[in-house]
Image: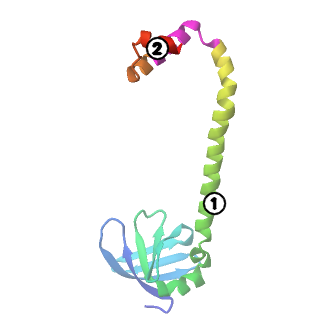
Amino acid sequence: MSESAVPGRYFDGRTAAGHDVEAVFSADGVSIRGQGHEIFWPAKRLRIAARDEHEIRLSNVREGEARLVIPARAAGVIGAAMPELLSGAPERRRMTALVIALIAAAAAVAGGVFFGAPAASGPLAERTPKELEIQMGENVAGQINLILKPCGADADLAPLS
């Protein structure tokens, strides 16, 4: 194993078998070598899938469930080669973009509901034929009466009128 190589376990994501490998980190990415594997993951595709005090699990966004598990003590080697990966900056940028996209989508929906629908309702109501309005009203009344049975005690209701 070379000086900058880090021991690890590689999981290809297709089987549960782990393979002992050595990972060599550079600014361009990580080379994974061992047990018949010779793989290079570019730095721009690397993500931290999980991290705790014992290990760091790296993934490649294009490799599905494949993982490279390295000891947490190797964080210095990763940090020296790819400082942005461990800083969390890429994840924060993705989360910020997601939040902005969700806010924009919510604003678009709210705009449609609170401004678009009322603006369209007047012209739609004017163009709706009277027969269609009557038919729709009867359908709605029928559905309501199906769920909530009308009261048949007219004599009992007379004092309330």
- What distance separates the C-alpha of mark 2 from that of mark 1? 60 Å
Quarter of the C terminus within the rendering: top right
* Residue 146 falls in image quadrant: top left
Position of residue 85 measured from the top left corner of the image (x, y, whole percent): 57, 74
- Describe the element under mark 1 as helix, strand or loop: helix
Q: Which residue is mark 1?
A: 96
Residue at 36 percent across and 66 percent down: it is 13
Side (left or right) of 40 relative to 11: right
Residue sitting at x 49%, y 64%: 61
Total count of labels? 2
Q: Which residues are magenta?
A: 127-141
Q: Is residue 11 above or below residue 7?
A: above
Residue 135 shown in magenta: yes
Tell me the residue at 51%/69% (across/down): 47
According to the picture, the residue beneath numbered tag 2 turns out to be 157
Please, what is the dominant secondary structure of the magenta stretch? helix
